[in-house]
Image (cartoon, grey):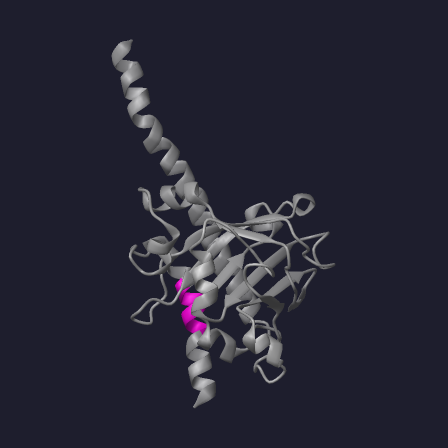
């Protein structure tokens, strides 16, 4: 009996890590699918130039994919950032909570995309928690194949944001929403304790299962390069 108990206790953390990792991978795969769908909508996606210059990209899938609880204004998704060698980092799992999500969120499925435009915005992602609009400037981003409609204020915002609900994809302000790393999911995903800084600065290997996510982001980046030529 004692040996059985010891075995159960020994397997407990591994079993929990396994379940948590599977959950984290679902968020990563859902994020890749959402991003790919949005960018394949003709003339309705994020302008190519914005993603090309992005320091980080965040994708919070909606109710259908990741359990977005509309009433509680809560979502879970991922962020990836450019590392010192120009490649995208491993994904860091994040939570977004509270704040004003605008009229688009309230019924049906909602997806949120965030683009961090500079290192200042990226540094906010390294913190335990920060508030959009207070600790980091955030504005609704322009929509279309080019960023010609981007205003001066949008150019200087640390973070641009969009949402997709009921088939409509548009820029949306998220003032008052808080963003923080999901430490439990990150630890489970990488099977050890890791900080958000380690993940987003490229000190953690990208999981093989995240390849569809990077394929979606890289595909659009190549389109941006081709359009610029």
Q: Quadrant of residue 72?
A: top right
Does the magenta-highlighted stretch encompass residue 216? yes
Q: Is residue 99 above or below residue 215?
A: above
Residue that sits furthest to the front in the current view: 134
Residue that sits furthest to the top in the current view: 1
Query: From which residue to which does the magenta span run?
Result: 214-220
State the predominant SS element of the stretch in magenta. helix
> At x 42% / y 40%, what residue is drawn?
184
Q: Position of residue 204 (x, y in %)?
A: 30, 54
> At x 29% / y 9%, what residue is drawn?
1
For the residue pair 15 and 90, the one nearer the viewer reads as 90
Q: Is residue 107 above or below residue 16?
A: below
Q: Position of residue 102 (x, y in %)?
A: 71, 59
Does the magenta-highlighted stretch encompass residue 41? no
Q: Quadrant of residue 15?
A: top left
Left or right of 86 on screen, residue 69: right
Q: Is residue 103 above or below residue 225?
A: above
Q: Position of residue 12 (x, y in %)?
A: 35, 27
Residue that sits furthest to the left in the current view: 3
Quarter of the figure with the C terminus? bottom left
For the residue pair 122 and 217, the one nearer the viewer reads as 122
């Amino acid at each position: 009996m004692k040996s059985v108990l010891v075995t159960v206790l020994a397997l407990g953390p591994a079993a929990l890590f396994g379940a948590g990792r599977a959950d984290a991978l679902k968020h990563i795969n859902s994020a890749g699918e959402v991003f790919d769908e949005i960018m394949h909508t003709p003339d309705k996606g994020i302008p190519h130039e914005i993603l090309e210059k992005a320091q980080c990209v965040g994708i919070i899938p909606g109710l259908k994919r990741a359990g977005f609880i509309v009433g509680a204004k809560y979502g879970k998704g991922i962020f990836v950032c450019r590392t010192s060698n120009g490649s995208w980092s491993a994904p860091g799992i994040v939570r977004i909570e509270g704040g004003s999500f605008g009229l688009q969120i309230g019924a049906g499925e909602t997806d949120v995309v965030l683009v961090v435009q500079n290192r200042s915005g990226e540094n906010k992602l390294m913190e335990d928690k920060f508030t959009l609009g207070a600790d980091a400037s955030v504005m609704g981003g322009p929509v279309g194949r080019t960023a010609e409609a981007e205003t001066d204020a949008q150019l200087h915002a640390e973070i641009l944001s969009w949402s997709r609900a009921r088939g409509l994809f548009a820029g949306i302000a998220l003032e008052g929403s808080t963003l923080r790393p999901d430490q439990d999911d990150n630890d489970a995903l990488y099977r050890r304790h890791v900080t958000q800084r380690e993940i987003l600065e490229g000190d953690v290997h990208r999981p093989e299962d995240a390849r569809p996510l990077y394929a979606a982001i890289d595909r659009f980046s190549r389109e941006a390069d081709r359009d610029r030529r």
